Image (cartoon, grey):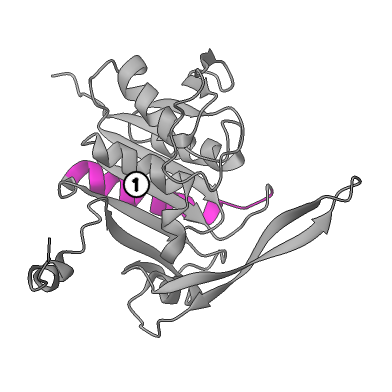
Amino acid sequence: MTKIHPTILVVNDDGITAPGIKCLMEAMQELGRVVVVAPDSPQSGMGHAITVGKPLRFDKVDIYEGIEMYSCSGTPVDCVKLAVNKVFKGRKPDLCVSGINHGLNNSINVLYSGTMSAAVEGAIESIPSIGFSLDDYTLQADFSHSIKYVKEIAAQVLKNGLPAGTLLNVNFPATPHIKGIKISRQANAKWAEEFDERMDPHKRPYYWLTGVFQLNDGGEDTDVWALENGYVSVVPVQFDMTAHHAIPLLHSWTFNV
């Protein structure tokens, strides 16, 4: 009997030529047939944005020998949507993996992340999905120590599946001396943002977003704690944003209309 290999969609937000997606693609080749659909330029911080006001360009490209690859002018979420509709033509791949992102997507960052939003879109399409990120923002980032964890986590998802409406947010510490994997929760943290005001040559102000990451959580079961202590953090994420615990409170209100 012929063994059927899984089909794996690889996406990212750093762009189709980023080192992180090359590492992820190579790791996934050991697990199945790889199809890459990625932005033609960096799309970090795009969150779950989609392109609605202009046409999208979608081109097959030949960057790495033997890999089916497509470059998209849109956002990471656009990439997943186009992959499902135009590449797979309604058939679903067995797995969607996004990354490996240059920089962490732990805690509140998951809301802003193009990497994670691509994985969320995969989960919305009922595809088992994982977002991978590394605590190194440089183009010279060393992904080598994360590869065996990427393959093992992806293999577990392919073998066991994920609950409906759920995906995984996986973050790697920068250290090559990883202690293991911690199943974690999202830490309670936020960005204390500031805008650095500067002047252009025409004396008009412009602004650069800056900020400080504020951790308001001392728990040892969080993604922040895991990463600070040399572990890979694995957080199950859902796209149902209903605050179920608040529904009883709202039922207790009296609406005078």
User: Which image quarter is the N terminus in?
Assistant: top left
At a point 72% along the width and 55% down the height, the residue shown is 207
At a point 55% along the width and 43% down the height, the residue shown is 20
Chain part drawn in magenta:
140-159
Q: Is residue 218 above or below residue 50?
A: below
Q: Is residue 29 visible?
A: no
Q: Nearer the viewer, residue 208 or 13?
A: 208
At a point 39% along the width and 56% down the height, the residue shown is 170
Q: Nearer the viewer, residue 221 or 148?
A: 221
Furthest-right residue in this view? 201
Q: Is residue 84 above or below residue 176?
A: above
Q: In the rendering, at what x and y percent does residue 130 appear?
A: 34, 46
Q: In the rendering, at what x and y percent does residue 187 appear?
A: 38, 72
Q: Is residue 129 visible?
A: yes
Query: Residue 142 lies in magenta, yes or no?
Result: yes
Residue 78 as seen in the image, left or right of residue 248: right
Furthest-bottom residue in this view? 218
Badge 1 density bin: few <14, some 14–19, many ≥20, Cα 10 Å: many
Q: Main secondary structure of the magenta part?
A: helix
Helix or strand or loop: what does disc 1 sit on? strand
- Label 1 amino acid? Ile
Q: Which residue is mark 1?
A: 130
User: Which image quarter is the C terminus in?
Assistant: bottom left
